Image (tube, rainbow, N blue to C red):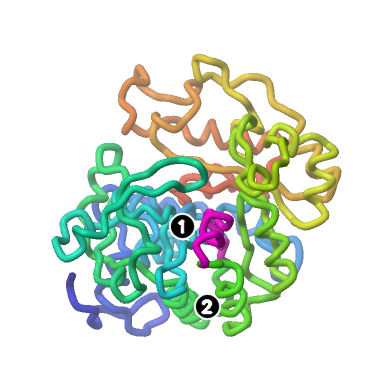
């Protein structure tokens, strides 16, 4: 990977490394996104935060960074998200063998790094079970943080996002400490904090391996003075959020997958409830006892018919608001493949083609949703600008 070296001043005249500059520039597939973000920011000048330290509403969270334009969970993706105007940046966390936290969507790094092409790690490939599913690959818990730092991050969706493969191997796998250092530096330069949404991945699975995530995360948040503000901790497991509530005063989000799914902590406890039970009024009242927000898949807000068109909306947003919970849904992506059929362009068969994501955003915001996770945060900022006026 290229060496980190000074290349050019950033917007406030201070020096940036070449690696960071490449993360910020809108080359290749994102050639027009910086202009779009500038327009979005101009359009939402009157839509500021509701109180000091609160994000604007609707909040636009860069999903794994600006992952529609750069390989996910790299400093390049995070930097670009910041430059595009994202209100917050989502960072997924998994542990290493030496009890460090690194930023990956999953502990299986087969498809997000170049590990498969590294002969020195060939013997680390293995088959494991994560939350009841058998997976074959390379796993972060079998590496030290230093070893993972030698790997290059690669585009997870190369067929959908071929332009992003230009950056394969350019950025290494970052540790959470490196991201917190980056965020602190960026915050000083721009004069306000960089809000982070930190997701604890598979906490029950890792706890069983002796690799607790909550304790090292809490220690780092206290070390960087982030245990009370500017950070939102997320998890699909309520038990993990309760553990964090004992250690920090950050905001907490319970993430919710499909209605028929069963959170791993409930399964291990013998609790038969599914997400469908958690999104009832009684379930939401319980969630409000340990979380400030829910993060539902958008299909829980507006379900889809069998043909992928939108069905009638649910009452989830209103029910959550009635119990004091904000709602940040996931995930908006520009490509046809990820949009409801109502908003696909052309004949819908080209999954990589951009669809009518503006129409999709309007549909979800029309339900009163408070925020959206987006792979292309500039697009959602533009679509959300009117709602902020």
Q: Are marks 2 and 1 in contact (CB under 8 Å)?
A: no
* Number of the label disc, if any, that sits on residue 50: none
Residue 119 is situated, as x and y percent measured from the top left of the image, at 14, 61
* Number of the label disc, if any, that sits on residue 187: 2
Residue bearing the label numbered 1 = 38
What is the C-alpha distance between the residues marked 2 and 1?
A: 19 Å
**Residue 326 visible to the viewer:** yes
Residue 334 is situated, as x and y percent measured from the top left of the image, at 42, 38
Instruction: Write down the quadrant of residue 3 in the picture.
Output: bottom left
Quadrant of the drawing holding the N terminus: bottom left
Task: Note whether 121 is above or below 352 in the view shown.
Answer: below
**Residue 34 visible to the viewer:** no
- Closest to the camera, between mark 2 and mark 1, is 2
Local SS, label 1: helix
How packed mark 2 is, by other alpha carbons closer than 10 Å (few <14, some 14-19, many 20 or more), is some
Task: Note whether 158 is above or below 16 in the view shown.
Answer: above
First to last magenta residue range: 196-210
How packed mark 1 is, by other alpha carbons closer than 10 Å (few <14, some 14-19, many 20 or more), is some
Residue 292 is situated, as x and y percent measured from the top left of the image, at 75, 56
N-term mark: 2 or 1: 1
């Amino acid at each position: 990977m290229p060496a980190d070296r000074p290349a050019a001043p950033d917007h406030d005249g201070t020096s940036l490394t070449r690696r960071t500059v490449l993360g910020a520039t809108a080359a290749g597939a994102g050639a027009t996104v910086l202009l779009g973000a500038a327009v979005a920011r101009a359009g939402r000048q009157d839509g500021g935060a509701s109180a000091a330290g609160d994000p604007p509403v609707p909040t636009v969270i860069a999903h794994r960074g600006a992952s529609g334009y750069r390989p996910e969970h790299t400093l390049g993706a995070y930097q670009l998200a910041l430059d595009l105007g994202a209100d917050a940046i989502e960072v997924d966390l998994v542990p290493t063998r030496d009890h460090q936290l690194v930023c990956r969507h999953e502990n299986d790094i087969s498809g997000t790094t170049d590990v498969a092409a590294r002969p020195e790690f060939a013997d680390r490939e293995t088959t494991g079970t994560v939350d009841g599913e058998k997976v074959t690959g390379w796993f972060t818990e079998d590496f030290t943080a230093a070893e993972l730092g030698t790997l290059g991050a690669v585009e997870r969706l190369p067929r959908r996002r071929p332009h992003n493969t230009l950056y394969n191997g350019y950025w290494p796998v970052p540790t959470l400490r490196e991201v917190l250092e980056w965020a602190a530096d960026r915050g000083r330069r721009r004069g306000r904090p960089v809000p982070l949404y930190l997701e604890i991945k598979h906490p029950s699975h890792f706890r069983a391996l002796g690799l607790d995530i909550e304790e090292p995360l809490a220690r780092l948040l206290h070390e960087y003075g982030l245990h009370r503000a500017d950070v939102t901790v997320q998890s699909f497991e309520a038990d993990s959020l309760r553990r964090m509530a004992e250690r920090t005063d950050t905001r907490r989000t319970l993430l919710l997958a499909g209605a028929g799914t069963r959170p791993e902590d409930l399964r291990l406890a013998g609790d038969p409830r599914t997400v469908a039970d958690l999104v009832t009024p009684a379930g939401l009242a319980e969630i409000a006892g340990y979380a400030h927000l829910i993060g539902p898949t958008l299909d829980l807000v507006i379900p889809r018919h069998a043909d992928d068109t939108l069905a009638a909306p649910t009452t989830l947003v209103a029910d959550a608001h009635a119990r004091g919970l904000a709602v940040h849904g996931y995930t908006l992506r520009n490509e046809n493949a990820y949009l409801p059929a109502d908003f696909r362009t052309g004949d819908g068969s080209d999954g990589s083609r951009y669809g009518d994501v503006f129409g999709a955003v309007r549909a979800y915001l029309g339900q009163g949703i408070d925020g959206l996770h987006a792979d292309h945060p500039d697009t959602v900022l533009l679509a959300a600008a009117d709602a902020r006026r």
